Image: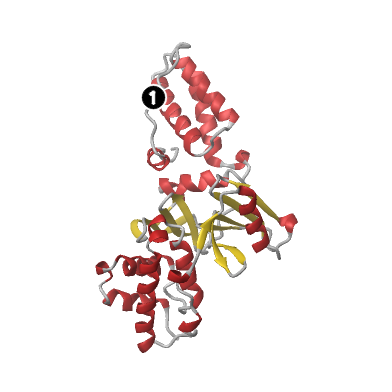
Amino acid sequence: MSSVTQLAQFLLKLNPQNSVARLAFYHWVKNLMDLESEFELRMIEQFYEHAMQVPYWQTAHRELGESVQADLIAFAHSHPLNFDLKDLRHVNTWQTIELLNGHDFYQVLKESNSNADPDKSKYVALSGQQILQIQVTAASGIDVAVYSNRVRIDGRLLKPLSPLTRLRYNSTLDLLPGVPQLLQTSHLKWARFQVADGTCHGLLLQGHTFQKTEAFMGRPVNQYPELYYSLKRLERHFIDLNSDPLYQELITMLEKANAMAGSHHPEATRLVEVALQKGQLAIKNIFPNDKLLTLLVTNLEYRITDGQPQRSAPASKPEESCQNLHPLP
């Protein structure tokens, strides 16, 4: 049977740069599928489900479905498949809708997961458009998924599309080593990566063509700011902050900066500036509404301005701010 690698090689020979639909499919196959695995029907469905959560393809789904269908027919002429292409319903025949009512969105997710133990499942509304699902596994780890509120109409049923984030943790709430992880880092960016022996390998993808923008080449996760801080933003919903090293380092730094503010210590000015910047960015992008962090940052602002109101910094996009929030030394 044909492999994912063979499909990627076939698409490359078709000059994917000449077709935006083919280019998106090629990048998905090359960057998000397991190249060593056998090519299966479900992989195409997952591609379609992910694509239909991208605004560009919601309006261009006909082009996408027709392009992929033609390429798969051509591929099957020279490569045996373990499924019948007639069993694949292409995205140009799909109907998807956004569920604007949060309760309806929750009910669709819950019903799609009806076989799970309700005592081992938890749902958290991240926004009006996303819900976080947390499930305890048989090995006492957790599976984490973030779903968008766009669902597929399948006959009389509404079915959630594939999660835009899917993370797997062990019983100590560390990412499972050697397991592919998918994380949406911002609106149109995703990281596909694996961790092992304290290092990270993978790719950062962007836009409606799922193009690679950065490679994770074996350094610790905290050396890749966008990936690391996106993880921390999500993990605060299910990992105790008292055991989070980033949070504890921020608290320690801010406490030290508050104690040194206004002193004549030669390192006081630098420490206060660094601590204040890190604290402000952390509140904005990672730990919003955290009372202790907010208190320490507010006290530090008060100390360095002698009680005068501090001018607000210009607003910045979350992903841009995270790039500036480098790991603590």
Q: In the image shown, does 220 or 310 lie closer to the viewer?
A: 310
Q: In the image shown, does 66 or 237 lie closer to the viewer?
A: 66
Residue 260 versus residue 5 in the image, above or below: above
Q: Quadrant of residue 135?
A: bottom right
Amino acid type at image mark 1: Arg
Residue 92 position, x and y percent, is 43, 70
> Which SS class for mark 1?
helix
Question: In this figure, which colouring scheme has been used for the structure?
Answer: secondary structure
- Which part of the image, by quadrant, shows the C terminus? top left
Q: In the image shown, does 311 or 140 lie closer to the viewer?
A: 311
Can the viewer see residue 196? Answer: no
- The residue to which callout 1 is attached is 270
Residue 285 position, x and y percent, is 47, 38
Q: Residues within 10 Å of mark 1 (few under 14, many from 20)?
A: few
Residue 255 position, x and y percent, is 53, 25
Residue 151 position, x and y percent, is 54, 60
Q: Quadrant of residue 168?
A: bottom right
- Which part of the image, by quadrant, shows the N terminus? bottom left
Residue visible at 32% across and 67% down? 23
Residue visible at 47% across and 44% down? 229
Tell me how many marks there are.
Answer: 1
Residue visible at 56% across and 45% down? 126
Q: In the displayed structure, does residue 48 sit left or right of residue 11?
A: right
Can the viewer see residue 162? Answer: yes
Q: Quadrant of residue 70?
A: bottom left
Residue visible at 46% across and 47% down? 228
